[in-house]
């Protein structure tokens, strides 16, 4: 926690945040846990297996509003806290147009698609607090300050503590410092509020060959926005009258915006009517990112004095290349009354890479290669058709990207369910997704 508080630099966590994707999109797609790689016929598949566009038999327009609720539990020094956040967003909007070719040279139709699919959500709120009898964040500032002149202090962290009289020169030596807490036992509190998400504008084309082979390609234009506001506080027990120090509050604000692009190609083959096989490859996504950040510090003392200081406005431009993805799928069509699909996805997170000009990320990229690993994702979804009603269930397991340590088993599981109603010219679907990690 202390490391994240004093670091404003881009790191491996940023690379991971924008490399991990979830299944957004339509309610039907979500209710089947995003598992439709060999089935197609849903506009969300344009972001997974674009061959799914070739399954469409007629023009279709969809829009999917979504309500996202996050509950986070945290434990610090034995104290448990729970915080929640609610968000409304658009999971999907798009149009697929079908042009019949009537079997000319074996081609039954060609399809064009354009739309937007949400691929990740950064909505979260974390709260944690506990008394700490062994350390303070001010220890970190003292360690950073020792051996340096005050003019050289980091203006976003240590320099703020210096300007608010939280660290001061030590009488025992030159460029040696101490802080205002003579003995520990202060209440430490931290809250982190994040918002934003990732989405992809897709432009797709596909073709249907003899109703046996379906091919498609997608050019994806990625949009990313991440906003984080973090507040950290330390307060002395009100019974402590010896230190002269009451409290301090350190706030950090970060906004990251980015745009990128990728290419996806896919194929679906139906060797027999009841079986479909699908495969897709996603090229790495190259995202141009810009960070804007700032920090503030506020301190209070028992003699009534209060100090406030604000950092400069920081800004940094860089880019991220995410790993490539490979997806294999198998689907079963059971007498046109039921569907079952299994997707297997492979991704190697060690191929994520940050870049800048000049390049300052060699240490970060080395950390990515040592800290993360390749992993497999599994998505299973089924649908039972009781015309005009359809019932859907799904499960997704996303493997932990971590190579070791306490997060080695940080898998993510999603349990999904949904119901749909379809007539000749319209349909309406509902989905519920519960994700735990």
Image: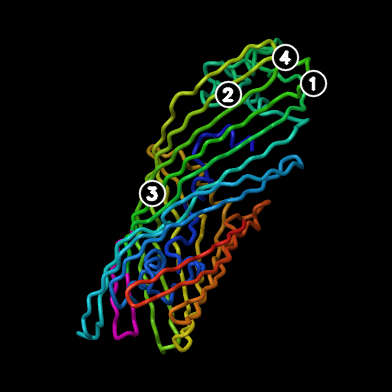
The number of callouts visible is: 4
Locate residue 129, reporting x and y percent: 69, 36
Q: Are marks 4 and 1 in contact (CB under 8 Å)?
A: no
First in residue order: circle 4 vs circle 3: 4
CB within 8 Å, label 2 to label 3? no
The image position of residue 102, as x and y in percent, is 21, 84
> In which quarter of the view is residue 76 placed?
top right
**In x, y percent, where is residue 437?**
62, 56
Disc sitting over residue 239 in the figure: 1
Gap in angstroms between the C-alphas marked 4 and 3: 49 Å
> What residue is disc 3 on?
287
Residue 217 counted in the magenta span:
no
Residue range (magenta)? 202-216
Residue picked out by circle 2? 158
Residue drawn at x 29%, y 79% as measured from the top left: 208
For label 2, count other residues whose C-alpha is less than 10 Å away and answer few (under 14), some (14-19) or many (20+). Answer: many
Mark 4 highlights which residue?
244
Quadrant of the rendered structure where residue 426 is?
bottom left
Viewer-proximal residue among 31 and 160 = 31
* Viewer-side label of 4, 2: 4
Q: Is residue 221 above or below residue 316?
A: below
């Amino acid at each position: 926690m202390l490391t994240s508080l004093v670091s404003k630099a881009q790191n491996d966590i940023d690379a991971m945040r924008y490399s991990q994707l979830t299944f957004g999109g339509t309610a039907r797609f979500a209710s089947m846990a995003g598992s439709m790689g060999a089935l197609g016929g849903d506009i969300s598949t344009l972001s997974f297996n674009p061959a799914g566009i070739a399954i469409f038999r007629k023009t279709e327009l969809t829009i999917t509003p979504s309500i996202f609720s996050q509950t986070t539990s945290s434990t610090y020094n034995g104290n448990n806290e729970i915080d929640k956040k609610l968000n409304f967003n658009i999971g999907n909007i798009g149009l697929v147009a079908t042009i019949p070719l009537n079997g000319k040279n074996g081609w039954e139709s060609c399809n064009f698609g354009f739309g937007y699919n949400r691929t990740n959500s950064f909505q979260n709120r974390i709260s944690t607090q506990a008394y700490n009898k062994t350390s303070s964040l001010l220890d970190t500032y003292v360690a950073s300050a020792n051996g340096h002149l005050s003019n050289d202090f980091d203006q976003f962290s240590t320099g703020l503590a210096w300007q608010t009289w939280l660290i001061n020169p030590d009488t025992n030596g030159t460029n040696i410092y101490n802080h205002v807490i003579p003995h520990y036992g202060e209440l430490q509190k931290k809250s982190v509020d994040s918002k934003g998400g990732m989405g992809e504008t897709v432009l797709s084309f596909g073709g249907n060959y003899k109703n046996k082979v379906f091919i498609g390609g997608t050019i994806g234009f990625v949009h990313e926005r991440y906003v984080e506001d973090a507040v950290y506080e330390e307060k002395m027990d009100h019974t402590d009258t010896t230190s002269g120090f009451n409290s301090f509050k350190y706030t950090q604000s970060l906004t990251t915006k980015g745009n990128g692009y990728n290419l996806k190609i896919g194929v679906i083959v139906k060797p027999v009517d009841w079986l479909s096989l699908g495969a897709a490859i996603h090229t790495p996504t190259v995202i141009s990112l810009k960070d804007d950040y700032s920090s503030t510090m506020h301190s209070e003392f028992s003699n009534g004095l209060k100090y406030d200081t604000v950092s400069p406005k920081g800004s940094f431009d860089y880019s991220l290349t995410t790993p490539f993805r490979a997806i294999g799928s198998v689907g079963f069509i059971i007498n046109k009354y039921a569907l079952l699909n299994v997707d297997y996805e492979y991704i190697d997170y060690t191929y994520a890479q940050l870049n800048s000009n000049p390049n300052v990320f060699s240490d970060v990229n080395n950390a990515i290669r040592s800290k993360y690993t390749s992993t497999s994702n599994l998505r299973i979804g089924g649908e039972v058709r009781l015309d005009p009603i359809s019932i859907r269930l799904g499960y997704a397991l996303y493997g932990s990207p971590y190579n070791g340590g306490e997060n080695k088993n940080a898998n993510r599981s999603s349990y999904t369910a949904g119901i749909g109603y379809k007539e000749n010219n319209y349909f309406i679907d509902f989905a519920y997704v519960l994700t735990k990690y």
